[in-house]
């Protein structure tokens, strides 16, 4: 029987065996709770038909469980010191491929092609310092990814899953909603990791939409307007947007809001994605 390593004693033994030192620059926090790993596997809905991309496998605690639940796991680890550890802890699995690379520099489309897969699922315990760039990179490139199930900082997960008018709601909420449906899988306490992070964590699942949730004339302009709408949260949408995106004149924004039957004193945090899309289309047409 294969020895599972998702517990404090096995994890410490592996760390001691290899004289491993945690690197702050890589945001390394290893999972030591098998119950949380089971919840991640269940949340990701893995099957024996799935090819999984794991980002930052660490010592392979989650990787082991995914190898048993899926067809293939591609584990991408940036820290070269962890490669011999992974080769050891995953030696009993013939369906794991270990890659020593920076996920933001990796040609994921080429990787998917090499595996002969028509789509993949991303499952990971992500380093918190680079969570948003990794997730947005995966979504914006329109890769054949059916879902992304990741452990991230609780505050970021709540922002991704937030609704208009709430404190957590912002540009990240809208960007996530544009590309995917969100589901909070479970909350995770700091003592489920070694070393313990200073913040709470959460597992969130992003199910990729086949097409974006709204239709806009220009996607780049939509995100400029969303960014502008939240640039100065305490100001009205008109002031926040025109101050941060001077290509839009105040009178243009006022006119667009009136067409949409929205109060000209409204703040950016009150608009949903459909309203931002309608606002974008009106402003683009007005500039033509």
Image (cartoon, grey):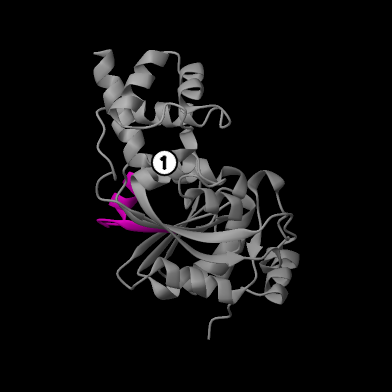
Q: Is residue 231 magenta?
A: no
Q: Position of residue 275 (x, y in %)?
A: 34, 37
Horizontal side of 129 relative to 141 (left or right) equals: right
Q: Which residues are magenta?
A: 106-123
Q: Quarter-wise, where is residue 139 in the image?
A: top left
Mark 1: which secondary structure? helix
Q: Position of residue 28 (x, y in %)?
A: 65, 54
Q: Quarter-wise, where is residue 10 in the image?
A: bottom right
Q: The C terminus appears in which quarter of the rendering?
A: top left
* Camera-nearest residue between 204 and 81: 204
* Camera-nearest residue between 44 and 53: 44
Using the rendered image of the protein, determine whether residue 66 is visible from the camera's viewpoint.
no
Q: Residue at x 69, y 55 (%)?
A: 199
Q: Is residue 110 magenta?
A: yes
Q: Residue at x 61, y 59 (%)?
A: 201
Q: Which residue is labeled 1 in the image? A: 175
Q: Quarter-wise, where is residue 202 in the image?
A: bottom right
Q: Position of residue 125 (x, y in %)?
A: 55, 58
* Camera-nearest residue between 217 and 32: 217
């Amino acid at each position: 029987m294969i020895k599972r390593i998702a517990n404090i004693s096995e994890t410490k033994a592996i760390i001691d065996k290899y004289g491993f030192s945690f690197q702050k620059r890589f945001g390394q926090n290893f999972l030591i709770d098998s119950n949380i790993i089971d919840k991640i596997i269940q949340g990701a809905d893995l099957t024996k038909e799935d090819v999984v991309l794991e980002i930052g496998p660490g010592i392979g605690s989650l990787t082991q469980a995914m190898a048993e639940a899926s067809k293939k796991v591609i584990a991408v680890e940036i820290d070269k010191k962890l490669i011999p550890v992974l080769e050891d802890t995953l030696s009993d699995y013939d369906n794991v491929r270990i890659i020593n690379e920076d996920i933001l520099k990796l040609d994921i489309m080429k990787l998917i092609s090499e595996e002969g897969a028509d789509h993949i699922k991303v499952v990971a315990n992500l380093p918190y310092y680079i969570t948003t760039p990794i997730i947005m990179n995966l979504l914006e490139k329109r890769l054949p990814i059916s879902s992304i199930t990741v452990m991230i900082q609780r505050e970021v997960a709540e922002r991704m899953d937030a609704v208009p008018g709430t404190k957590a709601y912002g540009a990240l909420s809208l960007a996530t909603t544009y590309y995917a449906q969100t589901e909070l899988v479970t909350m995770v306490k700091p003592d489920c990791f070694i070393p313990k992070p200073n913040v709470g964590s959460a597992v969130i699942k992003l199910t990729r939409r086949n097409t974006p949730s709204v239709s806009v004339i220009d996607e780049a302009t939509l995100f400029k307007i969303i960014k502008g709408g939240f640039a100065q949260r305490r100001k009205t949408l008109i002031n926040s947007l025109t101050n941060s995106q001077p290509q839009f004149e105040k009178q243009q924004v006022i006119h667009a809001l009136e067409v949409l039957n929205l109060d000209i004193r409204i703040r950016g945090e009150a608009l949903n994605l459909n309203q931002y899309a309608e606002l974008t289309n009106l402003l683009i047409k007005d500039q033509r």
